[in-house]
Image (cartoon, rainbow, N blue to C red):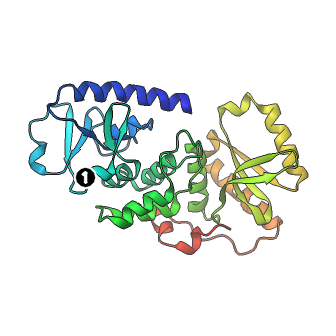
Amino acid sequence: MRHQAWLIQRYYLKRCRAVRDTLEHEPVFALSSALGLMGIAPPETAVLDLGKEHIVVRNRDARRGHPANVACHAWSLLDDRIVIRIFDLYCTSPAATFAQFVRFNWFEETIILADRLTCRDERLRRATKQELMDFLDERKVYGGKAARRALRLSRPNTDSRWERELRLDAMKWGLPNPEANHPVDLGSGLAWLDMAYEKYRVAMEFHGQQHLEQYVADTRRMNALAAKNWVVLPAWQSTVLDQAELHRYFSQVAAALEHAGAVDFLHPRMDLWTLSGNPELLEPF
């Protein structure tokens, strides 16, 4: 993950420097360009021309006279407090980039962007969830309502997009909100579960391609968790991509919860926007 972030950042450093050298002023990069400088791949579904570099200015008149490969956006919120320096370039801060991106992003991608900015890896983490919320609370942002609702569904310390999608799909299906990245003390050390219902000792784990290479280590961990009376249900990429398989998987999670004594825990199936408007369903179960 760190190597991928480095490749993305190096690619955008080259692109942004090339643009900076053609301008008569020091640009502040924004949106997809700012994310790229932070080592984050911009959402492919964003309603932006990702082939251009995006910069931000405070006044509309300042947008004139830029080359064709530069998209210049006027944003009245721009000031020195929301600008950071990455190497020799300037861009909007992580919280400002998140807030500005809302109007160009699908709702689910906004949730995923919040997760990415607040990821588990401390070297790749760009913000805390509280910092994102504080920015929205302190300023009137276009799309602020959608951003706040996205943050309700965001979970910091999540590194895998597939883990995020599995968690969100579980809640859309009707399962209660699991705790993300739950630690379990095995005596010999901590095991981290992707998604867990601690009270009932039921967990969901996403296994990526790399798990095939570390099967022995994973088996030892699963055995240790089983010895602590944890039921861990693994899911693969094929599980997430196949709706019938996903339905079967979530049915098994529900059955495990029922077997552990959970009652009346399923809620009606709903989309993420509707779910974000029901705070009681977002409480950890």
- Number of numbered discs on residues: 1
Quadrant where the image shows the N terminus: top right
Task: Name the one closer to the observer, 250 or 126.
Answer: 126
Q: Is residue 117 visible?
A: yes
At a point 59% along the width and 48% down the height, the residue shown is: 158
At a point 29% along the width and 26% down the height, the residue shown is: 17
Where is residue 226? Give x, y as percent: 87, 50
In the current view of this chain or complex, which residue is farthest to the right?
Answer: 227
Image position of 233 (left or right of 174):
right
Instruction: Give the residue pinned by disc 1.
Output: 78
Where is residue 68? Give x, y as percent: 16, 31
Where is residue 27? Give x, y as percent: 23, 37
At a point 66% along the width and 59% down the height, the residue shown is: 179
Image position of 179 (left or right of 259):
left
Where is residue 93? Give x, y as percent: 37, 47
Quarter of the image for residue 138 reads bottom left
SS state under label 1:
loop
